[in-house]
Image (cartoon, grey):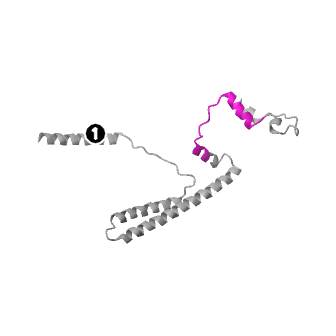
Amino acid sequence: MVEETEAKEHDQYTWLIQAAHRKSTRKQCYTTSTPYWWNENIDKKRKQCNKLRRNQTRAVRSQGENRQAANDAREAHKACKRDLVKTIRDTKWKCWKELRAELDTNIWGNTYSIVTKTFGMLTPYDLSIEKRRKVLGVLFPTSLEKLGLAATAKNVLSPSPALWLMN
């Protein structure tokens, strides 16, 4: 009898401690941004596909003698999934073409931000002054000989924009 009451008390205390822990700790809420190619049409088709998948699972569990309902549910889910994959593929291709067209007009637009997020290059590199000068010298050469234009223009009064960045 005493062991039963101790076991009950132990269970009650355990439950209370777990409840207090659940109340005191915050749930982590992860907010992820949607991909650049995501749209409402894809979202609707995805929800429909998930609904059909759940219906298929229920039909398989409760099929018993009626296998035809499970097969119909499976075929409906497969067709919806094929349509969803095709829609995503077409939308990705369309958005990729739009990004390429935007790159021609605005190099620092959405294309730049998508590429930097994809490749994880959001933080600038920590380079010394000498390395910066070397990189800028390669990207923005100051002499016309490096550009192959020494014969066409001999006198250049304005320095390269790279030199302005060094100050």
* Residue 165, x across and y down, in percent: 71, 33
Left or right of 19? Residue 126 is right
Q: Residue furthest left?
A: 1
Q: Which amino acid type is marked by label 1?
A: Ile
Left or right of 139? Residue 45 is left
* Above or below for 122 versus 101: above
* Residue 157, x across and y down, in percent: 84, 33
Tell me where residue 124 sits by quadrant.
Answer: top right
Left or right of 99? Residue 162 is right
Q: Nearer the viewer, residue 112 or 75?
A: 75
User: Could you tell me which residue is drawn at 50 percent across and 58 percent down?
Assistant: 43
User: Could you tell me which residue is drawn at 50 percent across and 48 percent down?
Assistant: 32
- Check residue 161 for magenta coloring: no
Tell me where residue 135 sits by quadrant.
Answer: top right
Tell me the residue that label 1 is attached to: 17
User: Could you tell me which residue is drawn at 45 percent across and 68 percent down?
Assistant: 75
User: Could you tell me which residue is drawn at 46 percent across and 60 percent down?
Assistant: 47
- Check residue 119 for magenta coloring: yes
In which quadrant is the C terminus drawn? top right
* Residue 14, x across and y down, in percent: 25, 40
Per the image, label 1 sits on a secondary structure element best described as helix
Main secondary-structure element of the magenta-colored stretch: helix
Badge 1 local density, few (<14 within 10 Å), some, or many (20+)?
A: few
- The residue segment tinted magenta is 113-141
In which quadrant is the N terminus drawn? top left
The image shows a total of numbered marks equal to 1
* Residue 84, x across and y down, in percent: 51, 61
